[in-house]
Amino acid sequence: DAKTTQPPSMDCAEGRAANLPCNHSTISGNEYVYWYRQIHSQGPQYIIHGLKNNETNEMASLIITEDRKSSTLILPHATLRDTAVYYCIVRVGTGYSTLTFGKGTMLLVSP
Amino acid sequence: SAVISQKPSRDICQRGTSLTIQCQVDSQVTMMFWYRQQPGQSLTLIATANQGSEATYESGFVIDKFPISRPNLTFSTLTVSNMSPEDSSIYLCSVAGTGNTIYFGEGSWLTVV
């Protein structure tokens, strides 16, 4: 699986949009971009994933650049409960492929 | 998504003993994975457990230390054998669910004293 690069930490004010960047310049054509988050003391929670088109669900939006070398996870209205470590992972979306976790980004949402 | 239950959620164990962690899924899944998360660290894959075959271990993890069972499509166990304080970690069960997306349980927090 391709390696990803994320900033170690970010801050966001409650109610504002949180934009979490991820670089994956060596991504292959069959690899998807997955985002997970881990709130302290809990198991990782799946957020969203995409191949090349932008994706949106009830939790977040995923914007993938046209060359697919980077992406941004957007939490449109961050709340205190969004404070967590966010992991950007690239993974082949089919077959028996696993998740390789990096260090992620620690997002701190403040009042 | 898949609902994954792990037992125990927490335990304090004596060094030299072994503990078996159970993972129950609410639907049949082919692929199950076991991860470890040491204090302050990210997640590391221990092994992949597919029903009907031997578990496949990642580099640095061996079957004698982390034996895994996968008796059916909804259940798996991970045993942490002959524990030492270095085994104090969160152990996480995960499965490949709908659309091949991987989902995680809440983890089992082990402290070895």
Image (cartoon, helix red, strand yellow):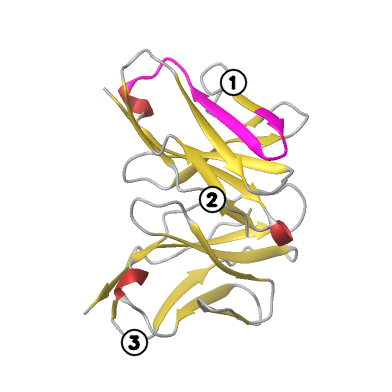
Nearer to us: label 3 or label 2: 2
Q: Are marks 3 and 2 in contact (CB under 8 Å)?
A: no
Residue A94, given in percent of the width and then of the height, sits at: 76, 56
Q: Position of residue B26 (x, y in %)?
A: 64, 48
Task: Name which residue type carries label 2.
Answer: Phe
Chain identity of mark 1: B
Q: Which residues are magenta?
A: B70-84
Q: Which residue is mark 1?
A: B63
Identify the amino acid type marked 3: Arg
Q: In this view of the protein, which residue sits in the foreground, B23 or A71?
A: B23
For label 3, the residue is A16
**SS of the residue at dot 2?**
strand
Circle 3 SS class? loop
Distance, label 3 to label 2, CA atoms, is: 28 Å
Query: Three-letter amino acid code at disc 1?
Result: Ile
Mark 3 Cα-neighbour bin, 10 Å: few <14, some 14–19, many ≥20: few
For label 2, the crowd category at 10 Å Cα-Cα, with few meaning under 14, some 14 to 19 and many 20 or more, is many
The residue lying toward the viewer, choosing from B37 and B4, is B4
Quarter that holds the C terminus of chain B: top left
| Residue A74 rendering spot, x and y as whole percentages | 47, 80
Observer-side mark, 2 or 1, equals 2
- The quadrant in which residue B63 appears is top right
- Residue A65 vs B6, above or below: the answer is below
Q: Which mark is residue B104?
A: 2
Circle 1: is it few (<14), some (14-19), or many (20+) Cα within 10 Å?
some
